[in-house]
Each structure stands twice: as C-alpha cells, then as structure tokens.
Image (cartoon, grey):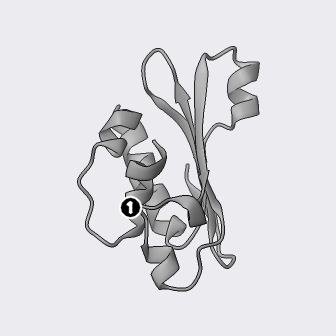
Amino acid sequence: MPWCAFLNPPLASVGISEDEAAKEDREMRVAKADIAKIAVMPRPKILGNPAGMAKFVVDTKTDEILGATLHCVDSQELINTVAAVMRLGGTAADLRDGIWTHPSSTEVFNGVL
C-alpha cells in the first residue's frame, strides 16, 4: 500500500525497506541517489526544489521491486507508478527502461534504477 507525507518535498513509500528485506533473507540490491545529482531528472531543479533522495530495494534474482522510498518533487504521484508495477509483476528494468516525458520527475526511474 503506497503512502505519502505531504512535506516539502513530499515523502512517499511502498513495499518493504532494506532492513525488512534483510530480515526476510532476500538477496537484494539497493539503488539510491540524491535527487540533486540525477542529471537525467531536471524537473526538481527547474522548480527550484532539488532536495531529497530516491531509493529502491530490488530482488537480485528476479529484478522484482521489493520497495521504494521517494523524497522529492512529485513523489506523491511517482509512488503510484511504482506500486502499479509491483502489483502487475513488473520489474525494476521495466521502470528503468521506460521512455518518460521530458522534463518530468518520472525520469528518476531512468536515473536511479
């Protein structure tokens, strides 16, 4: 179930955390980046709010997205896309390889995953 705290920028999450995945003995990789450092994601900079970070917990065997935490401009919308991919059995590669409109915050998927 995705959730969001409407901070500035918003904080949103879905799925399980890195710690929870470790407790379940899941083999995982963690993909994360500071929003200000994601070159392919200019929208937050354009809006003057490049604060925050993005983090994805991904199963290394299946490429299944186990969880995501987004603290950035538009995260309240982005998290719904992540949740849909998780529900539909998509993978991190599906998000990473998507062709997203430019400039948009969805480019976080290209830049982090």
Residue occupying image coordinates x 67% and y 79%: 8
Q: Quadrant of residue 42?
A: bottom left
Residue 13 % position (x, y):
61, 53
Residue 23 % position (x, y):
76, 20
Image vertical order of residue 8 relative to residue 61, above or below: below
Badge 1 crowding class, 10 Å Cα cut-off, few under 14, some 14 to 19, many 20 or more, is many
Q: Nearer the viewer, residue 4 or 41?
A: 41
Residue occupying image coordinates x 31% and y 38%: 94
Secondary structure of residue under mark 1: helix
Residue occupying image coordinates x 66% and y 65%: 52
Residue 29 % position (x, y):
58, 27
Q: Nearer the viewer, residue 104 or 42?
A: 42
Residue 83 % position (x, y):
45, 48
Lateral position of residue 28 relative to residue 22, left or right? left
Image vertical order of residue 21 relative to residue 56, above or below: above
- Residue that badge 1 annotates: 106
Lateral position of residue 103 relative to residue 49, left or right? left
Disc 1 marks a residue whose amino acid type is: Thr
- In the rendered image, which quarter contains the C terminus? top left
